[in-house]
Amino acid sequence: MTQDNPEAAVHEAMGRGDYRQALTLLMGLYGKSIYNYCRHMLGHDANAEEALQTTFAQAFVDFPRYARRAPLRQWLQGIARHRCLDMLKTMRRESKHVERPETTPDAESDEPSAEERLHFGTVGRQQLAHCLDQLDAEVRDAILLRFMEELSYEEMAKLTGKRAATLQMRVARAMSGLRKCLEASGVTL
Amino acid sequence: MTCDRFETEGLARFVAGEPLEAHFEECADCRAARASYQSVASALQQARGAYSPPGDWEAKVWARVARNRSTRRWPAVLGFAATAAALGVFVLGSLRGPEALVLTADAERGTGPVVRGGATGRSDVRSMAPGEVLVLRAKVPRGKQGDVRVYRGANELVFQCANTPACVRVKDGLEARVTLDRAGIYRAIGIASDGPLPAATGNLDADYAQAMRSCDRPQHCATELTPIEVR
């Protein structure tokens, strides 16, 4: 059933060679979550959009080679992850100190808005984004995969090529760093 | 004295989703630490929908897909050119000559303004209403035969120049008027060939690939507009 497995319709479209339909469905299913992952990884609206576009354009090219070893979501996540890490390398090359300007209208505000508080509880979006920025890229990647993408450590290990135990340590380190940073920003946890 | 066992022992188990031993329930410091980490985890989970991509991002992906197709064969062409140059062969002229196949689109919207767009870099026609007329103009390289095809989705051929009087020959190519009467995503391609044009297959990708295969210079034989949504 499509309702049980949202990817079933994509697989059907791919099966009959209708890659356009497959891409349309895939963008509808995962566009927003991939954008959020990229936005949190890169810390920048325009770069996140660039990564989002290249991820799906690459998926279209790679459809014939998709071997169903992983769900489409994870396959797509793998493409997005590589694009984001590549972009971070490029950004580092261009500037020793990567500037990651916030481009959202409320970027200047350190205090979470009432809407944000409602949405995130005590932790504001800007504060969370700021503290994620303080983490190393690989550590940030690990915590986003675990808690935002809700991948298991085994799934993360397949995606990243790292050992599950290593990833678990990275996530624990990231959690500790995030907690300290959020508390230093005045967030009561 | 505060207890830091949750930091040193409990956190690793917490992030692994493993059960915690009794101490972490009994110790007030550890309970507080655990609650803090639970808040961090919840904030991360809720941040999953914090940002939304710009509204036109899907159209940009399609434009990128179309661009990739047009340039896919260039590495091979450039590789050949480099080899030829190394052999001392002087290649006259540019491979990207002025005679590339060009497809452009205008949307006729009643008495309102005409919106120009297309694959040549002008602002794209991205959405239309049912019943509006899409005017397609294909500039076909000299000596080639050309066709314009419009698909609704990937597999429904709704228009083909070769089969309809709604398509006329103009000075340097073809001009077609297509009424888009139903909602959906429409995709238009222009194709050209030195010999007889390949028959429509009923699948846009296959038509495009067929045109590319029979061609020495990709940009002379197939081009695709940004998809147009009718709603």
Image (spheres, rainbow, N blue to C red):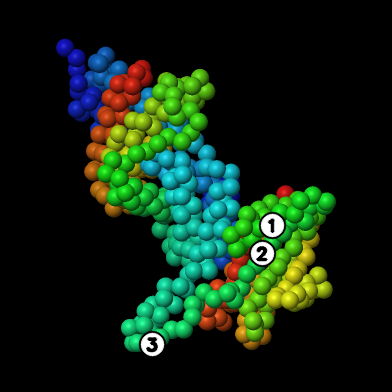
**First in sequence: mark 2 or mark 1?**
2
Q: Which residue is mark 1?
A: B116
Q: Residue furthest top?
A: B1
Residue A22 visible from this viewpoint? no
Q: Are marks 2 and 3 in contact (CB under 8 Å)?
A: no
Q: Residue at x 79, y 49 (%)?
A: B112
User: Alpha-carbon distance for marks 2 and 3?
Assistant: 36 Å
Q: Are marks 2 and 1 in contact (CB under 8 Å)?
A: yes
Q: Residue at x 30, y 26 (%)?
A: A181
- Picture quadrant where residue A109 is located: top left
Q: Secondary structure beneath disc 3?
A: loop
State whether discs 1 and 3 lie on one chain.
yes
Q: Can you give x and y, in whole percent of width and height, for residue B72 in the image?
A: 48, 70
Say which of marks 2 and 3 sits in front.
Answer: 3
**First in sequence: mark 2 or mark 3?**
3
Q: Can you give x and y, in whole percent of width and height, for residue A129 in the image?
A: 39, 32
State whether discs 2 and 3 lie on one chain.
yes
Height in image: B90 above or below B135?
A: below
Q: Residue at x 52, y 23 (%)?
A: A115
Q: Which residue is mark 2?
A: B104
Q: Which residue is mark 3?
A: B89
Residue B66 visible from this viewpoint? yes
Height in image: A161 above or below B218?
A: above
Instruction: Tell me the subunit letter for badge 1.
Output: B
User: Which residue is more in the foreground, B173 or A65?
Assistant: B173
Q: Are marks 1 and 3 in contact (CB under 8 Å)?
A: no
